Amino acid sequence: MENETKLMSVRDAIIMAMSEEMRRDESVFLMGEDVGIFGGDFGTSVGMLEEFGKERVRDTPISENAISGCAIGAAMTGMRPIVDVTFMDFIVYMMDNIVNQAAKTRYMYGGKGQIPVVFRCAAGSGVGSAAQHSQSLEAWFTHIPGIKVVAPGTPADVKGILKAAIRDNNPVIFLEYKAQFNMKGEVPLDPDFVLPLGKADIKREGTDVSVITYGRMLERVMQAAEEVHESDGVNVEVVDLRTLAPLDKDAVLESVKKTGRVLLVNDAHKTGGFIGEVAAMIAESDAFDYLDGRILRLAADDIPTPYNHILEKAMVPSVERIKKYILKLVNKR
Amino acid sequence: MSNNNAVQMLLCRIILIYAFPTKILRKLIMAKKKTSETALSKEKLLHMYKLMADIRYFDNRVNQLVKKGKVPGMTHFSVGEEAASVGAIAAIGEGDLITSNHRGHGQTIAMEIDLNEMMAEIIGRATGTCKGKGGSMHIADLDKGNLGANGIVGGGMGMAIGAALTQKMKKTGKIVVCFFGDGAVNEGTFHETMNLASIWKLPVIFYSINNMYGISTPISSVINIDYNYQRACAYGIPGHFIEDGNNVMDVYNKFEELVKYVREGNGPVLVESLTYRWYGHSTSDPGKYRTKAEVDEWKKKDPLVKYSKYLTDNKLATQKELDAIEKASKEAVEESVEFAFNSPEPSLESAFEDIFAP
């Protein structure tokens, strides 16, 4: 069991992580719209109602304000709720509870109480769901002290990071990507497979360029890295942040110092996006002195997500564009 | 209007009439209550008087400090509203919880907070309830079941139903009282939390303390019904009215009934009491929107005077005993002021502590 893995989708990794934690700890429960008989709007709780019953797999009305407030109050008083936000865009209706209540309560109360709650958000575009169902809003939350923000990019990391988020004693915003619920990978079956929050993972060792990314873009960055290696012999180091808040600054700076070149990639809008913060952090640090070129960012265009699939696809960094930027950095083309 | 709609409207009206008798009926009921003997011990009755006196003298003293420029931030006073909080909290039990509201001093003191620490918090010192990081709007006392006041109007309502969900899931038998002002009733969270609590039958008392103004805006200009408790029928839960929220025994008696109802697993209730704040909304409010005559009229309905009259008329306490309580309250408040101003400012390093739980 300890080292056993199984090929499974992100969706199944999410179900596995939640189910294991619910078996382990009575106070963990899932709530949200359509989590019960429907099995989640993206199928991320299929079978859980049958195993845990409707007390612990709680269908709610379409009431994001009440759902988020209720989860926070339950968390403050000894439960460990997981909220299925469904589309991340709907979190806008939860903002007071997350930003003004959950993030600040412990601080305002002088260190008393804790709010162990996870908000699982289906982020990103790629499924033709247009402007109100396609956003990646992580930067809104990384801006607020008191909230942890995580965005794993492989099925194994989804399991390990989600379990860590559930066990963490603070509010955690967990990004999962609509376009990647079916993405498959080997996932450890060990029910104690938990990854640390606040630790980046070097997904590919390299010497020429550091590409810093997270979440949905990891898959494309990995592909781009392999392809430029094949075509141009460029050796890319891929730094997968996994956790945006807290940010593993050391891992980022160490990689930058090693390669001297940086590209940052995410699928959220460029302006005010989280990678801008990472870029600034690099520019302010002593790693700046190691740079052999400009710090480049590749992000979604600053437009609402269009419905048309050609326009939608063009808005987000592609493998081709990532490759282009990598080669630009090493002056190969 | 379709037949179905007509039937629904009629049902809603019948519920309204049934659940909320007319003023005359209400007065008859209140009159009956007033003459009935109270089953409360003398000790408890006097303790309620002490808490009301504590609120009065504490907030009066904070007001004086504000005028002298000694309070570094915003405060909202509970003077005039003492009975509305004390009567409710006196009726809940050990281990029951509350969420307080924007005007939280009254509830916080009624939940037996340490006055020294509360004063130190308002003055912003390291010894304060929240180490000087919360101030007047964020005083909480989790160990005693006070989940905290809130700077966001209606902000505690979600927390209240969540705390109630915990009680239900863990089968603790405890209940939650969710305090909010009339200002919160038009926030979306009011509707969403009342609805969720009602469908899940959560053990929570939604308690609107109606002091009739949201800063300068009279409640009558922002709701299209007479009273907010009438909205209960929209959620299929009972609505209750405490017409004289300045009468602590009226508040207590109503809450005793509601606490029992909610604890028995019948789901939430909505209750509203009428009261009045003597001072402005916050320290910066000159109160131009109210006439002096109106304020004076309400000062005649002083909750402490009412309660002392009740206690002495019914020979439940002597004036001498009440005077002694008031004297002790004033002394306790003075001691809290001394404690607060003799306390250190928080260290600069402390600003970076307590953000995340370990």
Image (spheres, coloured by chain):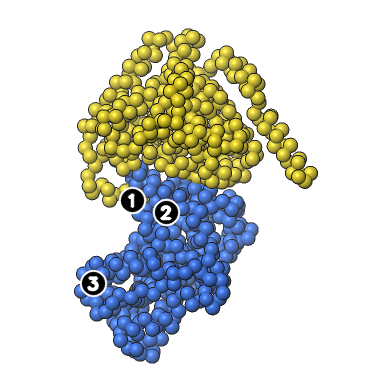
Measure how far apart labels 2 and 3 are at the Cα level: 31 Å
Residue annotated with mark 1: B355
Q: Earlier in the sequence, mark 2 or mark 3?
A: 2
Residue B351 x/y as whole percent = 27, 48
Q: CA distance from mark 2 to mark 1?
A: 11 Å
Please state the horizontal and vertical placement of residue B243, each as a whole percent of the image: 56, 24
Identify by letter the chain in yellow.
B
At label 1, the amino acid type is: Ile
| Secondary element type, mark 2 | loop
For numbered disc 3, what is the local secondary structure? helix
> In which chain is the residue bearing label 1?
B
The hue of chain A in the figure is blue
Q: Which residue is mark 2?
A: A171
Q: Which mark is residue A172?
A: none
Marks 2, 3 in one chain:
yes
Give how far apart the Cα atoms at labels 3 and 1 are: 28 Å
Q: Which residue is mark 3?
A: A287
Residue at (67, 32) in percent of width and height: B16
Q: Nearer the viewer, mark 2 or mark 3?
A: 3
Badge 2 sits on which subunit?
A
Which corner quadrant holds the N terminus of chain B?
top right
Judge from the rendering whether residue B189 lies leftward or rightward of residue B358; answer left or right: right
Q: Amino acid at mark 3?
A: Ala
Residue at the location (43% across, 66% down)?
A151
Q: Answer yes or no: do the residues labelled 3 and 1 have beta carbons within 8 Å?
A: no
Q: Nearer the viewer, residue B117 or A29?
A: B117
Specify the amino acid type for callout 2: Pro
